[in-house]
Image: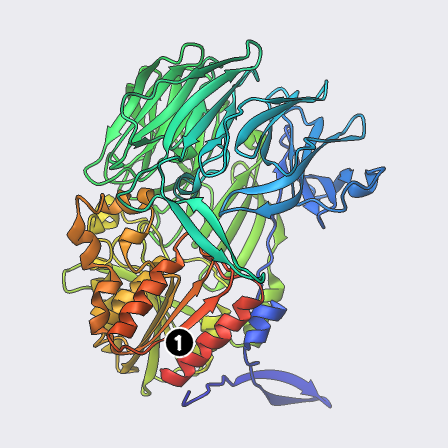
Amino acid sequence: MLRVSLILLFSLVTLSGKNTHVLEIPKEITLEDIYRKGIFTERTVAGLRSMNDGVHYTTMEAGSIIKKFSYRTGEEVEIMFSTEDLPENDFDSFSDYEFCNDERQILLVTGKEQIYRHSFRADFYIWDLQEKSLTRISELGKQQMATFSPDGSKVAFVFKNNLYFKDLPSGREVQVTSDGQENKIINGVPDWVYEEEFGFARAFDWSPDSRRLAYYRFDESHVKMFNMTIYGDLYPHWYQFKYPKAGEENALVTIHVYDLIDGVFTEMDTGEETDQYIPRIKWTTDPSRLAIYRLNRLQNHIEVLLANATTGSSELLWEETNKYFISETSDDMLNFLDDGKHFIVMSERSGWMHFYLYDMKGSLINAVTSGDWEVDRLIGIDQVSKKLYYSSSETSPLQRNIYSVGLDGTGKERLTLEDGTNSAVFSEGFRYYINYHSDANTPLHITLHDAGGELIRVLEDNSGLKEVREEYGFSEKEFFTFTTSEGIDLNGYTIKPPNFDETKKYPLFMYVYGGPGHQAVRDSHTAGAWYQMLAKKGYVIACVDNRGTGARGEEFMKSTYLQLGKYETVDQIEAAEYLGSKNYIDAGRIGIFGWSYGGYMVALCMTKGAEIFKLGISGAPVTNWRFYDTIYTERYMRTPQENPDGYDDNSPINHVDKLEGKFMIIHGTADDNVHLQNTIEMVDRMIDRGKQFELLLYPNQSHGIRGNAVYHMYTGITSFILENL
């Protein structure tokens, strides 16, 4: 790097009774500070569980103690569990816990072993608060997704692809299914693609009366196998799992109900079409009726079926079609009210994501929210006061605020008054909420409020991190908007060097993600110390949210439909040109960095935008959409058979000839999500075309690089930037 920038701060101090100006030079940010010492780590308040009374909560401390506190005073009330209570010292620590509904027992998670993004295996124990006794759920081995029945008398779990339950009073363990087989049949947990793209790890649900277990069965027999090489032994071995790539066969998914009293299995009727998705199942308030989401493979038509748990017969409750794709299929999409007569739906039917109230005949009663702004997420529904709590981007696409509104759509109230990003967690009964607030230049500020929004006390203000930011001379993040050649306004931010001088020329370093519905440009605090380090070394940092990103309505987000990468790349190129036209930017020194979808964007920018971008760092990129999974890819692109040009025209491996700048590509060799295949194929094309590149591979690392490899990776990335930009 040609120049190292320092800030000179003047502070007034008193020495020997005289006022003297002393130069204070901000500390230099180092990779050691960021990735080994954690100096810039933000403090938070996590792991709170509201108790049923709504006036107390519990926290886990040091993985060994569960304490009970008062919401209003913050005072400790009692220690509810400690590993010191264990007479035989069965385990020293636990990583998570859950109360049963009557709060007389605690489910403890120990020995956790991660599988994929959401799933894990662990040893589960029950601690009885009255008896002061510990019960191991199963002696079979580590289990998945142990879950209390609503009445607290049983725990269901999955072991080796089969569903089990344990009757706690008798200690009897019952195997519900017996056909589970690795890479063939799965009961009670999702396959890889459902877990990753529909975002759940438990594929079973107790009925409200604890009599029945509804569960998914995945038949993966015809799904093609993917192999990953795992290193470390004399002979590396293959890790094999079923991964359906775009246009290929998915697992056959069926929904079943097991009656614990009668011992009867019933398959639910989900229609004759089998090439479809079941994104969720959910019991209604009636323990004999199960709701099943049914989504066609194109993902532009969703239906909610009501199935009879005894007979398996089903009928249509609600449906919706979309000219692009259905965006919302999570638990938030549909919620049944306790009155048994109504349900709430999240829908983009107006072109913006909002809540709607329906009756149990599927008839629309009223919109709960409306307007040219987006609901972000459902926080909760107060069934007593008939209020819905949610966060939204009503004030700005860059911000999030918390609101309450009557289920009839009246009485909307904004609870959070500070600009920036707010996220709330309510107590049972909605008497209190804890708000997590930050903005672009202010770390997390965590406060306790009553239901009306009145501040009760501050839980965490990150005053230490604020001081650290000052000591190290952090620059402010500045937002801007510019208009593209197509008349589209795009939001962005910059971080400038601390001693910024408009008369000088600075290299530009851009960060991009850019994927569907995502936002990188938000008025929220992110650690960002590495970007601050680069700014202090004389780089202008910038980020722009292209078309396809979130919080700006359906047409903006879905404008990239069938052509992922095309308009996003156009927008990033124009953003670079816009910033490069500034007097203080050296247009000949523009670099770009991104991971995952962002890595894909970097690869496209370095090829399609070769005349603009002189350096690119592409982390874990998709380089050919044909290599990625069915659910995600086909949602935005349909199948390769239907849309071959959409797949090929914007896959980086098909544009390698255009590459000119300095290019680095990074990948974990055990990435189960974006396979190393993507990088290998890109590298093969670059070698064939005589294109030079840098390659960083991290053995046995998955989609996100972890541990000591993070420090190593950012050391390599930083050197690459300093030497080439």
**Residue 603 lies in quadrant:** bottom left
Residue ranking furthest to the right: 87
Q: Is residue 544 above or below residue 642?
A: below
SS state under label 1: loop
Q: Against 382, is 446 above or below?
A: below
Nearest the viewer among 717 and 342 is 717
At 51% from the left and 17% from the top, the residue drawn is: 258
Q: Residue at x 70, y 22 (%)?
A: 168
Percent position (x, y) of residue 2?
Answer: 40, 90
Q: In this orientation, does residue 512 appear?
A: no
Residue 713, position as x, y percentages in the image: 49, 71
In the image, is 451 to the left or to the right of 254? right
Q: Position of residue 656 (x, y in %)?
A: 24, 70
Question: In this view of the protein, which residue sits in the foreground, 366 or 28?
Answer: 28
Choose top left, top right, bottom left or bottom right for residue 139. top right
Query: Does any portion of residue 356 appear in the rendered image?
Result: yes
- Residue positioned 33% across, 87% down in the render: 504
Residue type at mark 1: give it: Lys
Q: What residue is disc 1 on?
A: 496
In the figure, is residue 146 to the left or right of 246? Answer: right
Q: How is the image coloured?
A: rainbow
Above/below status of 174 relative to 29:
above
Number of numbered discs overlaid on the protein picture: 1
In the rendered image, the quadrant that contains the C terminus is bottom left
Q: Is residue 34 above or below residue 57?
A: below
In which quadrant will I find the N terminus?
A: bottom left
Q: Residues within 10 Å of mark 1 (few under 14, many from 20)?
A: many
**Residue at horizontal 63 percent and vertical 90 percent from the top:** 20
List the single residue furthest toward the front. 235
Seen in the image, is 170 located left or right of residue 456?
right
Residue 196: x %, y % from top left? 42, 44
